[in-house]
């Protein structure tokens, strides 16, 4: 799966411990197929555009602008592609709304409450898959919490911390799903 070895279960485990490495192992071979020997992909490439629309929260109406930001010369390189996928892991509106619901409009919300809500927010934004069991989603939430620099017990999260954890959780789910699709 992903072209550089490792099945989808191995990549799912890697996503929980080293998300950036998992993303590169899953997405780099795909990008390389589009790029060929050029090592870059023109932003009008239909496969690239379709993948970005299907694999991010980027709206079709914003796609050209986001691709231009990532590739001002209209030739997208792998690091910019990965950054684009990471920046648009899930819609900000869903995250902001859930934070406001958790905190009743407060600027700080209990970290335990926020962490417990991560699976629900990810499922709301990305949909649910029968193969994604509750224990997997709990591990995703824990990894997102740890990876967002907010693992301290009893702490409160502000919106920025919550957004970072939600984004990380969505990235883990997205790369795990992509690894499963790429598996033979």
Image (tube, helix red, strand yellow):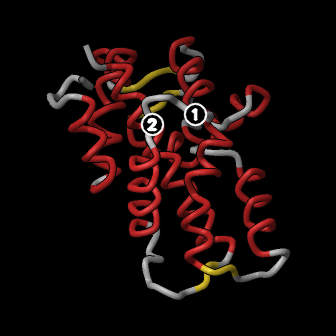
Query: Callout 2: helix, strand or loop?
Result: loop
Residue 62 vertical placement versus 171 (above, below): above
Residue 150 at x, y percent in the picture: 47, 77
Q: Which residue is mark 2?
A: 132
Give the side of residue 110 with respect to residue 168, left or right.
right
C-alpha separation, residue under disc 2 versus residue under disc 1:
7 Å
- Horizontally, is 162 left or right of 79 in the view? right
Quadrant where the N terminus is found in the figure: top left
127 on left or right of 179: right
As displayed, is residue 117 above or below residue 128?
Answer: below
Residue at the spot 83% in from the left edge and 74% down from the top edge: 104
x and y, in percent, of residue 13 in the image: 26, 46
**Furthest residue toward right:** 105
Q: Nearer the viewer, residue 19 or 143?
A: 143
Q: Position of residue 43 (x, y in %)?
A: 56, 23
Taking the view exactly as shown, the residue that stands out farthest to the left is 5
Circle 1 crowding by C-alpha within 10 Å: few under 14, some 14–19, many from 20? few
| Residue nearest the observer in this picture, 90 or 45 | 90
What is the secondary structure assignment of the residue under circle 1?
loop
* Circle number at residue 128: 1
The 10 Å Cα crowd at callout 2, few under 14, some 14 to 19, many 20 or more, is few
Identify the residue shown where x is 49% and y is 52%: 169
Proximity of marks 2 and 1: CB atoms separated by less than 8 Å: yes
Camera-side residue of 97 and 78: 97
């Amino acid at each position: 799966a992903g072209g550089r070895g490792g099945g989808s279960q191995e990549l799912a485990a890697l996503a929980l411990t080293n998300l950036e490495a998992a993303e590169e192992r899953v997405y780099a071979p795909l990008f390389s197929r589009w790029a060929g020997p050029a090592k870059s992909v023109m932003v009008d490439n239909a496969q690239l555009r379709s993948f970005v629309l299907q694999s991010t929260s980027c709206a079709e109406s914003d796609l050209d602008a986001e691709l231009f930001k990532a590739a001002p010369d209209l030739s997208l390189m792998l690091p910019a592609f990965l950054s684009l996928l990471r920046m648009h892991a899930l819609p900000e509106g869903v995250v902001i709304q859930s934070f406001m619901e958790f905190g009743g409009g407060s600027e700080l919300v209990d970290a335990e409450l926020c962490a417990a809500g991560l699976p629900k927010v990810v499922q709301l934004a990305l949909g649910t898959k029968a193969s994604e069991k509750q224990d997997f989603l709990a591990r995703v939430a824990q990894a997102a919490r740890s990876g967002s620099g907010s693992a301290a017990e009893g702490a409160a999260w502000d919106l920025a911390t919550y957004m970072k954890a939600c984004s990380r959780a969505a990235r883990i789910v997205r790369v795990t799903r992509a690894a499963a699709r790429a598996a033979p």
